[in-house]
Image (cartoon, grey):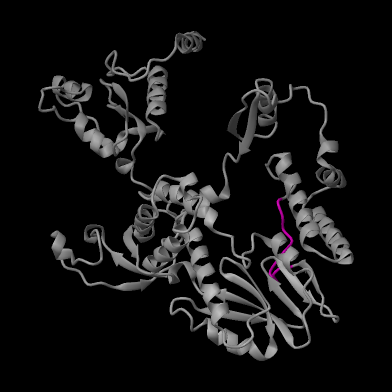
Amino acid sequence: MCLHKKSLLQIYPTGEQSPAFYGLPKIHKKEVPLRPIVSSVGSVTYELSRFLADIIGPLVGKSEHHIKNSADFVNKIKDIRVEEDEIITSYDVCSLFTSIPPKRAVAVVRDFLEPDTTLGERTSLSSKQICDLLELCLGCTYFVYNGQYYQQLHGCAMGSPVSPIVVNLYMERFETEALSTFPDTPPANWFRYVDDTFSRLKKTNADKFFQHINQIDDNIKFTQEMSQNNTLPFLDSKVIVEEDGLINVDVYRKPTHTDQYLAFQSHHPLEQKLGVIKTLFHRADTIITSEEAKSNEHRHLKDALNKCGYRQWSFNKALKPSHESKKPSNSKPLDKKKKTVNATIPYIHGVSEKLRRILQNFNIATNFKPHSTLRQKLVHPKDRVQKGTKSDVIYRLKREGPQCNDTYIGETSQPLKARYKQHCRATASGYSSAIYHHTQLHQGHSFRLDTTDILDREPRWYERGVKEAIYERIYNPTLNRKGGLRVELSSSFATQRAMEVSR
């Protein structure tokens, strides 16, 4: 991926205008080869991209060449016979996301949207309005990496929820043109999963067709993998052509695969460990077409999982039919007629299970999440957001010292730095915040942004007000004025808080 490197002060709204147009210092454009991990979560266009993905998503998959998953692929090829003059091969697009020009991609999406008669059921926006918003999302490619600001110069925005949908539609248009314009006999089968394609075609046309698909679009370039010894890996399956031309499918593992799975003694819920067994055996039962190969795979999985600590009772429990695996429980089962509330709590062995049984009596379905993971500790693909730039926060300003321990609890949708500046000055109308009033009354007392605590983050306006009121009750700040909160907590909370303090 090729990116345009810029310093913090050299970012400008569009690459079409020079920096001097915006009053910025003149810089020289430089392309640097970087391929960092990019995620658009939290970016200015992330929610808009999710909204557009829901609108455009149903357009994908209507082509006969589309593959949903490995099971769908196996179902489509299991009855195919490969003749002696035919060969199976796979094609892979080089850097698909960064190869497709956004403007051309938007034009393709428009061609899919305009004849769609069900569009009005999903949105009131016109196809032109959708495409205008889509062009904004695909072109908004600024991000921070290692303290520097970058702009992705080529292709659709990496990490955007709508980009996979756009590139899928682009590839549907591409394959239609490629198959219809090939001068010789086109492939008898062409099945594609995003940028990976399985094909069956004449041996004499293999090289010619490979050259053909690399000439259709200047932006789309393929690599090719031919079958070796009548075997071809595709997705997580291994396609085997038997002597009679019929196809058998087995599970494919890379040469570097180590059969290391989630250890049974690890700190995870039991259902997650049983889920490992269910998933691996389900894949074997779904993908493998030969009964002998299926039995061999089952034995292989049991041997591998035994080495990871799994015992026979865990296989019996995981592979038992769902209606037989349910045991009578001391807790009351969920009442499906009533509204079920979902709660997610950190997993702590021996504690979380008991909480789930208690909550189930109140028709609350409980999910577990890891309390701490290696990914959280070791992987930081994004630069840490500075405290002053965080918004939608509940914060605590404090003046710590031998003679003053005053604190203030507040909430804001603005960046914390902007809200802090408002606290430190009087308004034109003469109104002053409690912080400003305190510093004027007590000379030498000051509050610093770097010592301000961010207690919580909440993007929803009403919920943020509730959390502010809760933290105000917990910390009992000395500088908060009466009646200054947006939300008043119920008397039951005050009673419970008083009981905790008395204890």
Visible residue check, residue 63: yes
Q: Which residues are magenta?
A: 252-262
* Tally of numbered tags: 0
**Image-quadrant location for residue 200:** bottom right
Residue 221 rendering spot, x and y as whole percentages: 50, 78
Residue 168 rendering spot, x and y as whole percentages: 52, 64
> What residue is shown at x 15% (from left), y 19% (from top)?
441
Quadrant of the image for the N terminus? bottom left
Image-based side of 22 in relation to 240, left or right: left
**Residue 198 painted magenta:** no
Return the residue nearer the eye: 230 or 458: 230
Image-based side of 111 in relation to 72, left or right: left
Return the residue nearer the eye: 283 or 203: 203
**Residue 257 painted magenta:** yes
Visible residue check, residue 25: no
251 relative to 306, above or below:
below
> What residue is shown at x 30% (from left), y 23% (from top)?
408
454 relative to 142, above or below:
above
Task: Examine the residues drawn in magenta and state their main secondary structure.
Answer: loop
Residue 358 rendering spot, x and y as whole percentages: 68, 22
Image-based side of 176 in relation to 266, left or right: left
Residue 323 rendering spot, x and y as whole percentages: 83, 37
**Image-quadrant location for residue 445:** top left
